[in-house]
Image: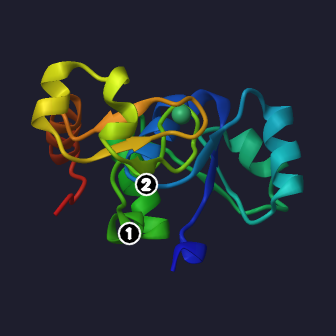
């Protein structure tokens, strides 16, 4: 099932959009520059290149590339959904938004020294990013992101 999830490369000017694709569960490499985007696509042609530049779209025409035309991230996600149906396959907060690596469940005992007491007492489920070792839980920041997703029109339930 996971093998059919679209995986993306976001063009340099779409870093914010790239982070949001990660928040909702889609692996998204964020290209530092156009040259890097080309190299990554050569190495992994199944990735979908997302850009807002018609020049970049044209130059990478041999790969799967998609151009967003709207300015806001909410509208850009909608455009991507119209084309790739990502909203049917949301997998919220499963990918580290910094590293683009799937976060792994971890027991509270294993991270007891690394989280505040109040968090330890109030939450059961924790995840850790194997890349940056950041610890995630369903705390207030997640609640704020969920509310933001609703305002952006992402169908979260
Ligand atoms: Zn990470």
Q: Is mark 2 within 8 Å of ligand 1?
A: no
Identified at 60% across, 75% down, the residue is 3
Q: How far across and down, in percent of the image, does residue 155 sit? A: 21, 60
Answer whether labels 2 and 1 touch (C-beta < 8 Å).
yes
Ligand 1 positioned in quadrant: top right
Question: Distance from label 2 to label 1 (Cα)?
Answer: 8 Å
SS at badge 1? helix
> Horizontal placement of 8 versus 40: left or right?
left
> Horizontal placement of 37 versus 146: left or right?
right
As drawn, which residue projects farthest toward the top?
Answer: 116
User: Which quarter of the picture shows residue 144?
Assistant: top left
> Horizontal placement of 60 versus 128: left or right?
right
Identified at 57% across, 45% down, the residue is 101
Q: Is residue 108 visible?
A: yes
Q: How far across and down, in percent of the image, does residue 31 sit? A: 71, 34
Q: Is residue 140 visible?
A: no
- Tag shown at residue 89: 1
User: Which quarter of the picture shows residue 85?
Assistant: bottom left
**Location of the C terminus (image quadrant):** bottom left
Q: Which residue is mark 2?
A: 25
Q: How far across and down, in percent of the image, does residue 112 sit? A: 32, 29
Identified at 80% across, 58% down, the residue is 61
Q: Is residue 42 above or below residue 146?
A: below
SS at badge 2? loop
As drawn, which residue projects farthest toward the bottom?
Answer: 1
């Amino acid at each position: 099932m996971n093998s059919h999830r679209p995986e993306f490369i976001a063009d340099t000017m779409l870093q914010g959009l790239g982070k949001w694709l990660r928040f909702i569960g889609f692996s998204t490499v964020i290209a530092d520059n156009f040259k890097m985007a080309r190299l990554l696509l050569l190495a992994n042609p199944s990735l979908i290149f997302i850009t807002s530049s018609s020049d970049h779209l044209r130059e990478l025409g041999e790969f799967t590339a998609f151009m967003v035309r709207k300015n806001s991230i909410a509208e850009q996600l909608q455009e991507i959904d119209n084309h790739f149906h990502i909203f049917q396959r949301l997998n919220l907060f499963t990918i580290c938004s910094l590293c683009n690596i799937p976060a792994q469940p971890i027991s509270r005992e294993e991270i007891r020294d690394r989280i505040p007491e109040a968090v330890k007492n109030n939450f059961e489920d924790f995840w850790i990013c194997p890349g940056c070792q950041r610890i995630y839980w369903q705390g207030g920041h997640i609640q704020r992101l969920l509310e933001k997703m609703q305002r952006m029109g992402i169908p979260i339930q």
